[in-house]
Image (cartoon, rainbow, N blue to C red):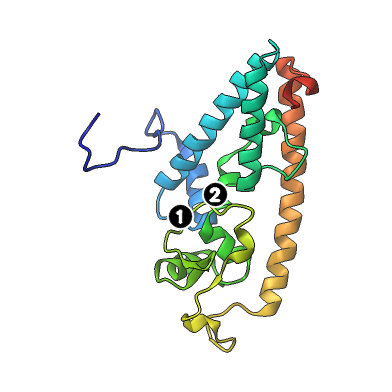
Amino acid sequence: MGDPKFSRKTYDTPSHPWQGERIKAEHEVVVEFGLKNKNEVWKAQSILRNYRKQSRELQSRLRGNDAQARIEADNLISKCSRMGILPISGGDLNDVLVLNERDLLSRRLQTIVFEKGLASTIKQARQMINHGHIFLNGHRVTVPGYIVLRSEEPTVEYAPTSAFTDEMHPMRATPDAIVAKTEAKAAVTEKHFEKKAKAAKEDAEAAGITAKDGEI
């Protein structure tokens, strides 16, 4: 069971250390989300790999009319919805199969702080969280990788004692930058969901899975 003083790794590393395309793709994700290193990418991939495994197993059991599988599938979809990686309504098990690391990394506190316009850059967002400038649900949170639930997102704000509460602070994001960032995110999100829906449909058709199999 290992030494109880030390926590085990909660993620799987790549099976091959030198794969040019994978290394390049991981680097792009690290830069896009301002991550410390690739371990954070691998953690997100491991979490989603587990969700996809559950989805495949549940779809197989649903085809056998397993009543317990319907309950577990409903719980999985509900959990993903609360996390913000699936829509509030209308999501199904096929949607879980096409989730990727960007879906989960976009729910990190660091990303939410940047997207809400509380920080000018994604790197600044990480620094502000580490230095205690951010409150979540009325409490100071200093973990950039904290996964923000959909219900918690509106409570992300500056800490009352933070110097950033001053609107004249030179490091605060400008209103124009916030508006431009919001519009760009909306466009990217819409395109992303369209791509996911198309990929889910194609994968389901290739696997011989009907819409009825994934619905709860």
What amino acid type should be assigned to the residue bearing mark 2? Leu
The x and y percentages for residue 17 are 37, 33
Tag 1 secondary structure: loop
The x and y percentages for residue 13 are 39, 34
Query: Contact (CB < 8 A) between labels 1 and 2?
Result: yes
Q: Residue at x 64, y 53 (%)?
A: 150
Q: Which of the pair 71/186 is nearer the observer?
A: 71
Residue linked to disc 1: 35
Q: Residue at x 55, y 42 (%)?
A: 101
Name the residue furthest bottom: 168
Residue linked to disc 2: 105
User: Split into 4 quadrants, where in the image is the C terminus?
Assistant: top right
Q: Which of the pair 162/191 is nearer the observer?
A: 162
Dot placed on the residue nearer the N-terminal end, 1 or 2: 1
In space, the residues marked 1 and 2 are separated at their CA atoms by 9 Å
Q: Residue at x 50, y 75 (%)?
A: 159
Q: Residue at x 52, y 43 (%)?
A: 25
Can the viewer see residue 21 in this picture?
no
Does residue 212 appear left or right of residue 35 in this picture? right
From what the image shows, is residue 187 above or below residue 56? below
Tag 2 secondary structure: helix
